[in-house]
Amino acid sequence: VFPSSSERTIMPLSLIPLPVSVEERPGNFLLEKTTRLVAHGDGAAEAARLLAKYLRPATGYSLPVVVGAAPAAGDIVLNENGHDKADALGFVDESHSLTVTSSRVELSAANVTGLKRAIQTLRQLFPPAIFAEKKQSGVEWRLPAVKVSDRPAFRWRGLHFDVARHFFPVADVERFIELAARHKFNVFHWHLTDDQGWRVEIRKYPRLTAVGSVRPCTCVGHLSESPRRYDDAPYGGFYTQSDVKRVVAFAAERGVTVVPEIDMPGHCQAAIAAYPELGNVPGANPGVRPHWGISQNILSPEPDTLKFMENVLGEVIRLFPSRCIHIGGDEALKYEWDNSVAAQRRLAAIGGRNMDDLQAWFIGKIAAFLRAKGRVAIGWDEIVSGGLPAGAAVMNWHEASPNSPMGRALAAGHLVINATAAHAYFDYYQADPGHEPLAIGGYLPCEKVYAFRPAPEWLKPAQKSLILGGQGQVWTEYVPDLARAEYMAYPRACALAERLWSPEGASTFRGFVDRLATHRERLNAAGVHAHPLP
Ligand code: TNX
């Protein structure tokens, strides 16, 4: 099988994700230590400073950023020719163009975000050593002459990172975001709380981190082993509010929005360990959960508990400018509610038929709180059963069909982010488990990620626009450190990036793999611990 003719022309540049249009031309541009970055517009100046920062380590050049100067031969020019007009969820037009001739480089976009995407393409046009973190000698920093015109297929291009099951220091989180930004992901979904650890400082409730961020020990090996094994070391870690601000600023500098997740009413065992009155069993403290799997602990459906979570979210929305706030809603077992007189009473009081209705009531109250603050609640697709709150968006993780929760959410006119496990769970094995480090299970080779269609073909035309985009998940039960996180995420995240950014059908998997050969040199230069397949 030969690549199609369009693939043959773009293959030498090996851009990932593949742009909408790439026209190669004769000639090249040489970056020198005197090359000026000339910015037109405030956003362009910001983008130029980011570009200078990106080019400094490998080249050793401190390129001057010049604002508003008339462009001359040898310049890299950044033009911002519009405004940062955001839609209701905060997304902006990211379309841009990038032109390289032997005498000039020109990046143009309506706003700073588009320019930041163009910068990521520009970096990939240099020799792969541009991604090295130390100064490289003997490399000529040449760009091939080319005209690239580009825009994303989807607005929401997310990567999720679970820092609850394992904790990752700020520097790791920043590196995770930086690698995502290189692939034009624009959302970082930060899964901050779970049964095994509460990882974000909340000033009003210090025990959430003082108690809830530390588990007494951690299970060793696979959860399914019998008997279950444990280590004997307490495990913990959390982000102070100033850490959070640093991460949000780091992401914003790269045009990435951080969407925090505070999971409720399930996945709250760590919170209940810190404040047992949030639970359903008076006098009982479950402790922070030392092993994986789904906890039976669930928040009580009481006004005081709702008020507590609203106070938590009140601090969260001051830390995170994101329009969207994720409130979890997944895997909330109803065992404790079924066995609680208070929960039964609450169910009767709201006139509900079953505990799904009670969960919907709980989520509805929280979503209304966020709405009143001008934010949009996002929940995993379990929030569909029992009825969706007005304006809430759904993050799909189950198999999707017209009758699945995602199908029903779309039929009711709700926005959806498709994060389906079958195509986008990077905690699954990507090769023969017999030769891989221990993982949760499943099997998701890169080719299956590449076959992902965030907007499935069964959608009605009017529903297509309700699909905001898609997202890859890095759950970390079996991901103890950043090297493993990179191994699980790359190159599968490269494949996902292309599904979310590039026009459907613009390349085959074979074309992607051909480009990946050069792209691997970029990953290697940056020291990314990528998986060797495909
Ligand atoms: C299900 S997906 C979960 C997570 C686990 C993951 C492991 C979802 C909303 N909940 O709590 O980490 O499976 O694959």
Image (spheres, grey):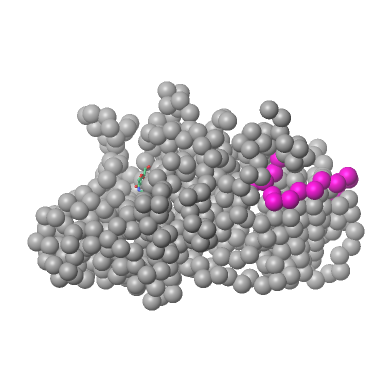
Q: In which quarter of the image is the C terminus?
A: top right
Q: Quadrant of the N terminus?
A: top right
User: In the picture shown, does residue 398 fall above or below 373?
Assistant: above
Q: Which residue is drawn at 31% across and 68% down?
A: 364
Q: In which quarter of the image is residue 490?
A: top right
Name of the residue lying farthest toward the bottom: 372
Does residue 17 appear left or right of residue 391 in this picture?
A: right
Residue 12 rendering spot, x and y as whole percentages: 76, 38
Observer-nearest residue: 388 or 362? 388
Does residue 103 appear left or right of residue 362 in this picture?
A: right
Observer-nearest residue: 176 or 401? 401
Q: Residue at x 24, y 47 (%)?
A: 295
User: In the picture shown, does residue 62 fall above or below 206?
Assistant: above
Residue 380 rendering spot, x and y as whole percentages: 37, 55
Residue 135 in sight: no
Residue 41 in sight: yes
In magenta segment, residue 442: no
Count of numbered labels shown in the rendering: 0
Residue 459 rendering spot, x and y as whole percentages: 48, 54
Q: In the rendered structure, which segment of residues is drawn in magenta?
A: 14-32
Residue 493 rendering spot, x and y as whole percentages: 54, 43
Observer-nearest residue: 264 or 352? 352
Name of the residue lying farthest toward the left: 341
Q: Which residue is drawn at 88% across and 44% down?
A: 26
